[in-house]
Structures are given as C-alpha cells and as structure tokens.
Amino acid sequence: MAAERAGSGGGRSRKVAKKRDHDFVTGTSYAPAPESSAQVKIAKSYDLFIGGKWVKGSKRMKTINPATEKVLSEVAVAGPKEVDLAVKAARKAYNNVWKKMPGRERGKYLFRVARLLQERAREFAVLESMDGGKPIRESRDVDLPLVAAHFFYHAGWADKLDYAFPGRKPQSLGVAGQVIPWNFPLLMAAWKLAPALACGNTVVLKPAETTPLTALLLAQVFEEAGLPDGVVNIVTGAGATGQALVEHPGVDKIAFTGSTGVGKMIQRALAKSGKKHTLELGGKAAHLIFDDAPINQAVEGIVNGIFFNQGHVCCAGSRLLVQEGVADLVIRKLKRRMETLVVGDPLDKNTDVGAINSKEQLGRIKGLVAAGEKEGACSWQSGQRLPGKGYWFKPTIFTDCAQSHRVVQEEIFGPVLAIQTFRTPEEGIEKANNTPYGLSGGVWTDKGSKIFKVTSAMRAGVLWANTYNKFDPTSPFGGYKESGVGREGGLHGLAAYLEI
Ligand code: TAP
C-alpha cells in the first residue's frame, strides 16, 4: 500500500526517485541539497580524554553512520581502570584548581567555550548528523544554538550563585559523574556540563556508545579554551563504562539521562551511597487537541513533536488524544502532511525524518509496532520509499487504540504515533495521565481558561500550549512518576549541582 503511494507524486517525483534508487530516496520532488561534510575531520581512532591528555582505553569499539552503515571511526572503551583514572583526575582538578577559582573566572571559561561552539557550529552539526542520523536541519538549527545557549546561560550564573539563592551559601558538590543518551548527544552533554562547571564541580562524562564523536570534538574545544586539565574528562564506552562511573566511590553526584529501565538500576545502585542524583528518563507524552483548536497549527505541532528527529525525543508527543468532533478532520490532515515528509539522507537540508540511530533501536521500534498490530490497533504508514542501506522507519500512526495497548503505554522512541479520541476534558486528562510516565505534554485549544484548567490537571513536568518541543536553558526540565527525579535547566538545575 505504502509503496504504491510513493510513485504517485507526479512525473518529476517518479524520475527523481528512480534516479536516486541506490542513494537516498525522498517522498517529495525537492532537488537534493546535501550539506558538505568537507569541514569535518574524523580521525581514524580516538582515545579517552582524561586529565587533559588523550589516554588509551582497554579496547576499542566502532562507531558507524546509521544512514549508510559505514564505519566512521574507532573509539576507545574505558574499563574500570580508566574510569578510576578519570575520577581521580577530576578530583585533583577539583581540589587544586576549580573549587578555589572565583566564579567570575570559571564563567570566563564557559563564555569562551560557548563562543568556540558558535564558531565551529557547522562542523559540530554535520558530525552530529553523521554519527547519530538526525537531520542536519535539526542539529544545525536546534541542537547547536541550544548547546551554545546553555553554556552562555550558565556562564552568566557562575559568579552570581549567592544571588541565585539569597541568604544561603551555595557550595559545589565535588566530582559529578554524567551519563548521557544518543538522541541529543551534544545537547545532553551541554545540559549536564554547563551547570556542573558553573557551580564549581568537575566532571567525568560518559557519552552513549553509538554517538561518541561530538563529545570527543567538544573535548578539543575545552583544550582550545584552555580549560584546566582534569576539569572535564570524557570516557567513551558502553553500558559497563557508565555502570563503573555510577558505582565509583569517588563520585559525589550522578546525573543520568536515558531510559527508565537503566534509570531504575542506577537508583538501586545509588541507594545508601549518599550520592546526590538527578535522573532524566523516558516519556510517553500526549497532545490533547480540543475541537476549538487551530487545527492546521496543531497538525504541524504533532508532526514536529513525533516525526521530526525520527521520534528520538524523550518528550516526543507519541500519543495524540483528539476530541471526537474533530478526530476525522485531524487524522485526514495528518495523513496528508505525513505524505509530504522527506525521509532520507540526514545531511540533506530538505530532510525531515533521518535515520534511526542504530540497528538495535530499529529492532525495538519494529517489535513494538508488531505488538500494536497484534493487539488490534490499526496501523497506517506514509508512502515514502526508504533508502536501501542504513536504518529507517516510515512515519507511522495507530488508530483504534485501547488504553491498555503497548503502543499507548510504552515508549517507542521512534516515528510512531498512537491516536485515541475523547469527549470531555476530564476524559482527555484521565487518558493523558494514564501511563507510568509524566515527562511532557501538549494542549491545543483556542481558550486560555481551558489551557490553565487542563495543564494544571496533567501530571507532566513540561507542558506546551498551542506549540510543542520548545526549549530554553532558563526553564527547568524534568518529569514526574517514572520520567525521572529532579530538574535540569534554570535555577532548579543549578540547585542540583550545589549544596545549599
Ligand atoms: P539508555 O540505554 O538508558 O542509555 C543511556 C546511557 O546510559 C548511555 O550512555 C548508556 O550507555 C548508559 N548505560 C547503559 N547501561 C548502563 C548502566 N547499567 N549503568 C550506567 N549507565 C548505563 O538510554 P538510550 O537508549 O541511550 O536513550 C533513550 C532513552 O533516553 C529514552 O528512554 C529517552 O526517553 C531517554 N531520554 C530522556 C531525556 C530526558 S531529559 N528525560 C532526554 C533524552 C533521552 P550505552 O549507550 O553504551 O548503552
């Protein structure tokens, strides 16, 4: 069904699709507009960044481009010995340099890092898209500006912590161990590093196994900025490296972003350790569309919330709750819009939906979609043809969903939307709240009073009204229930890196 529709986009579209059969094939007739990767120099191999030096790991792992399956580089794997070295380097830098340094001086380093990131933004954005599979439009226009904004924002706080918490004497914690996922590799690193450093802590950062390259390029920026040795240490590796970091007795605070399953394991490991922790975990956000909503705007918000960046967003609007009177209209418009999405080469500036980050993640998405079909929900996919190589999944919706279906309850972390209807605001709120998660959500309506009523009843840490997926370093971010513990960003995020 889907393949048939792909060829029905007019003569030019068919020609382009045919010509590019062995390359990237898109669902529309835009001419290719690939971003050059010439300015990105990827080394054959990378070591660990410990104490300001590049240190060999216990073994090596490959990192690949998920859009082409080509190996980009080999990266060192940190075992317990290297993690220990990194924690010791961070402790030394904390005791000898960073905790003694006046806030205004720490701030200068962060400002310098922010400016260097702006100067090298294109290089970082291209590398992020190559290593992670996300569309260049997202890494260039969303991730990189936000990364720089996080460093600028926290640089400004470094010498004003006493004003941030009047009447208190905020003190740094010591060494922070930070473990991050693959969906926003550089942005998650910035979310974690900038507040930790501004507050006077030193850091050991563990990037995700499948997306280590931008964190390693960031290490080069720290070198260029003259950051004292050991203030930031970067240890690449898989889950065992993260576990060694979490369990290391020399770490004072753990900041983790990732799945709820691993988050629970970490919370168990930290129990009785006395380590402070923040956990940013999974989500299953719902959009509530009321019949008085601006429908076209809402459809665009849904598409932005789940299909851009392949649904690899913790706060992705992966459930749609639509009021019965407008359900048919919304679904019709949504399907039409889905057909126009450009799926393919992440480096093409026209691309809306890039590659799925890894073969394992693609397998998880396929497994949950199969479970949805087996349980009786009705699936529909847009008609783009997918490239032959790499990891891809078509934008997909499920209708006729029951609240108990796995596609409604479980995080899929792919471009898959589960749609249900409701009649009254109370029913919509109850359905929205009826999952183990509580990270984010969206409300679409013309009435301000309804926005206040509905959002105050929704159990989610982040709520958007008549828009979706907007971020700002000044605003705290985090979830309720199984979506996490603590907040990142804003004053709340600073407090998480301080003894107040
Ligand atoms: P996870 O599999 O949980 O991995 C996250 C990080 O933890 C990776 O660096 C991973 O290393 C590491 N790790 C794995 N096992 C570990 C262990 N036992 N101890 C310590 N660290 C361990 O998540 P993911 O698949 O990368 O990311 C997707 C998840 O992140 C989704 O659930 C998404 O909702 C969530 N997320 C949440 C947020 C916020 S702000 N709430 C933001 C982004 C993503 P490897 O990569 O080597 O396995």
Image (tube, rainbow, N blue to C red):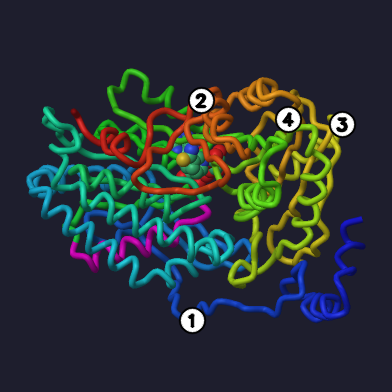
Name the residue: 69% across, 58% down.
391
Tell me where residue 213 sits by quadrant: bottom left
Name the residue: 18% across, 57% down.
229
Residue 359 visible? The answer is no
> Where, quadrant-wise, is the N terminus in this rendering?
bottom right
Residue 433: x %, y % from top left: 61, 24
Q: Above or below — where is 423 with respect to 304?
A: above
3D distance between C-alphas at marks 1 and 4: 43 Å
Q: Which residues are magenta?
A: 209-226
Q: Residue tagged by mark 2?
A: 456
Query: In the image, is 164 to the left or to the right of 271?
Result: left
Which residue reaches farthest top? Answer: 272
For marks 1 and 2, the one nearer the N-term is 1
Mark whose residue sits in front, 1 or 4: 4
Q: Residue tagged by mark 4?
A: 406
Amino acid type, residue under disc 4 in the picture:
Arg
Q: Tell me, yes or no, whether the two marked residues, 1 and 3, touch with CB atoms within 8 Å.
A: no
For marks 2 and 3, the one nearer the N-term is 3
Q: Tell me, yes or no, whether the two marked residues, 1 and 2, touch with CB atoms within 8 Å.
A: no
Amino acid type, residue under disc 1 in the picture:
Ala
Mark whose residue sits in front, 2 or 3: 2
Q: Residue tagged by mark 1?
A: 38
Amino acid type, residue under disc 2 in the picture:
Ser
3D distance between C-alphas at marks 2 and 3: 33 Å
Q: Above or below — where is 324 with respect to 56?
A: above
The disc at residue 376 is 3
Name the residue: 19% across, 37% down.
164
Q: Secondary structure at mark 1?
A: loop
Residue 223 among those drawn in magenta: yes
Q: Main secondary structure of the magenta part?
A: helix
Amino acid type, residue under disc 3 in the picture:
Gly
Q: Which residue is nearer to you in this view: 435 or 213?
A: 435
